[in-house]
Image (spheres, rainbow, N blue to C red):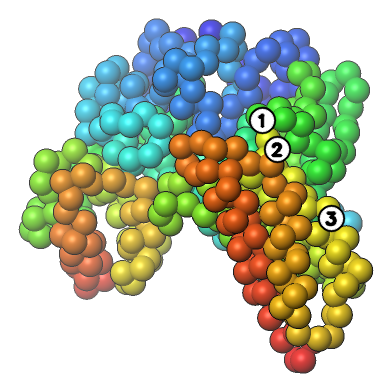
């Protein structure tokens, strides 16, 4: 095995172009588990922790550009106000030690259907900035990024540079089902983001299909039916839950059955929309 | 490969490190620092918690090469000028049973008290959520952290 350690972004892109089968490693919270258990023996590890620009975030043209290596602890500590959905999801990741190392970039690279970042990124309409030496930068919308179980639109010579997310235009919530409040991989998860200016609601389902995904029909239903100045109608809320559950394509596995996941997605969808709507009406009244 | 980094204030070099090797393995097997414990090897148990620069991390999930040029502080490093108040409090409250989880808990609790002078019980539980004790003496561990917090606050 080789250990590649670029110290600039250009060097990192060159290393990935020259050796597309090198496995990028950032916080190591996924990659090292696979190596420790001999599940994976990549020909090379491409350590990105010495590339300083990956570890910073900025506000560019009204959007947050979060470097791929920014750890969850920084998202919680510094971006919780602007990106509440993503920060809520970040708080549920692993443990403090894991949150000091794990990053949204790593979550995207692994592209696990259960990754905690994905639902809030989908709900907020985030975009993933990827780059290769040969073809330069591509911006991939989050809902076009996930292609299959642990497969993404990232090409072998590309690296994830950053994720771009607009500051929350309205209330955002994330909720996750697990056996305890720490160190759990999601049985299923759900994120909602209100965009009151556009009269639109974004959604994201986690661990309920081969990829994280939006509940598009549910979003269209709310865009057509919601009265943004009135309390939520129970029938509308119930239908929203059903449509979100309908968007799921879960499996039976050790963490839960497909039927349980579908049920739980409906509950999480209703619950998070109720919380968000409460905040929305409060802000309108203020 | 060769990896050079600072451990508990001293520069150390490990030779013939396998590229997929963890920082934990290097600490325990190459540098003679067995305080950090090797249990789950997947970041679940917190027994291998060390400071990497200033952040507590699971050493089993840090590739050894990633420590190149950085600062690592292990549980051994907390006791270089006598026991740290956190370590003393663990002894006094009986927060140690088999002792396997103790080094990780000590480092993690030490970090908490560096950041939060008087943590609430909820903050202590949250901070220690990634450290498993199977004996299980969590109540005594909470007592230890409360006692250490009092002592550290009094000494400030």
Q: Are marks 1 and 3 on the same chain?
A: yes
Using the image as rendered, state which of residue A95 and residue B117 is in the foreground: A95
Q: Considering the image in quadrants, where does the C terminus of chain B appear? A: bottom left
Image spot of residue A34 (x, y percent):
49, 23
Q: Chain of mark 3?
A: A
Residue located beneath label 3 in the image: A217
Q: Identify the residue at image location x=70%, y=38%.
A: A211
Residue found farthest to the bottom: A285
Measured Cα–Cα span from mark 1 to mark 3: 22 Å
Compared to residue A72, the image places residue B47 above or below, namely above
> Going from the N terminus, do you reach mark 2 or mark 3 first?
2
The secondary element bearing badge 2 is classed as loop
Between circles 1 and 3, the one closer to the viewer is 3
Measured Cα–Cα span from mark 2 to mark 3: 17 Å
Q: Residues at badges 1 and 2 in contact (C-beta under 8 Å)?
A: yes
Using the image as rendered, state which of residue A272 and residue A125 is in the foreground: A272
Measured Cα–Cα span from mark 1 to mark 2: 6 Å
Q: Identify the residue at image location x=39%, y=26%.
A: B23
In screen coordinates, is A265 left or right of B105? right
Residue located beneath label 2 in the image: A211
Residue A149, which numbered label?
1
Image spot of residue A126 (x, y percent):
80, 50
């Amino acid at each position: 095995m080789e250990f590649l350690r670029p110290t600039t972004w250009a060097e990192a892109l060159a290393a990935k172009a020259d050796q597309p089968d090198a496995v990028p490693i950032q916080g190591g919270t996924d990659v090292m588990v696979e190596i420790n258990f001999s599940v994976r023996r990549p020909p090379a590890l491409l350590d990105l922790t010495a590339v300083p620009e990956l570890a910073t975030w900025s506000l560019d043209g009204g959007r947050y550009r979060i470097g791929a290596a920014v750890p969850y602890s920084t998202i919680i500590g510094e971006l919780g106000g602007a990106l509440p959905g993503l920060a809520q999801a970040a708080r549920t990741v692993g443990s403090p030690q894991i949150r000091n190392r794990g990053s949204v970039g790593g979550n995207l690279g692994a592209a696990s259907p259960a990754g905690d970042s994905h639902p809030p990124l989908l709900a907020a309409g985030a975009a993933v900035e990827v780059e290769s030496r040969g073809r330069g930068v591509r911006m991939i919308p989050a809902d076009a990024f996930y292609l299959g179980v642990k497969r993404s639109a990232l090409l072998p010579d590309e690296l994830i540079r950053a994720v771009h997310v607009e500051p929350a235009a309205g209330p955002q919530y994330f909720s996750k089902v697990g056996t305890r409040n720490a160190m759990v991989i999601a049985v299923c998860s759900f994120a909602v983001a209100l965009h009151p200016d556009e009269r639109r609601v974004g959604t994201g389902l986690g661990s309920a299909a081969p990829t994280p995904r939006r509940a598009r029909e549910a979003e269209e239903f709310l865009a057509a039916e919601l009265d943004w100045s009135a309390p939520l109608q129970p029938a509308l809320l119930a239908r929203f839950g059903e449509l979100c559950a309908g968007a799921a394509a879960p499996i039976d596995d050790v963490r839960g059955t497909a039927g349980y996941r579908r049920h739980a997605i409906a509950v999480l969808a209703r619950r998070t929309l109720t919380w968000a709507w409460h905040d929305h009406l409060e802000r309108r009244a203020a | 490969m060769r990896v050079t980094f600072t451990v508990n204030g001293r520069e150390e070099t490990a030779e013939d490190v396998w590229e997929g090797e963890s920082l934990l393995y290097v600490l325990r097997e190459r540098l003679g620092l067995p305080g950090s414990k090797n249990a789950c090897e997947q970041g679940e148990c917190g027994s291998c918690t060390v400071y990497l620069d200033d952040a507590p991390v699971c050493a089993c999930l840090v590739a050894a090469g990633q420590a190149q040029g950085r600062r690592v502080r292990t549980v051994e490093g907390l006791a270089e000028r006598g026991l740290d108040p956190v370590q003393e409090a663990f002894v006094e409250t009986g927060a140690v049973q088999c002792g396997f989880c103790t080094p990780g808990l000590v480092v993690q609790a030490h970090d908490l008290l560096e950041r939060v002078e008087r943590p609430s019980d909820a903050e202590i539980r949250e901070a220690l959520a990634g450290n498993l004790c199977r004996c299980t003496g969590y109540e005594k561990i909470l007592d230890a952290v409360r006692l250490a917090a009092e002592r550290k606050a009094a000494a400030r």
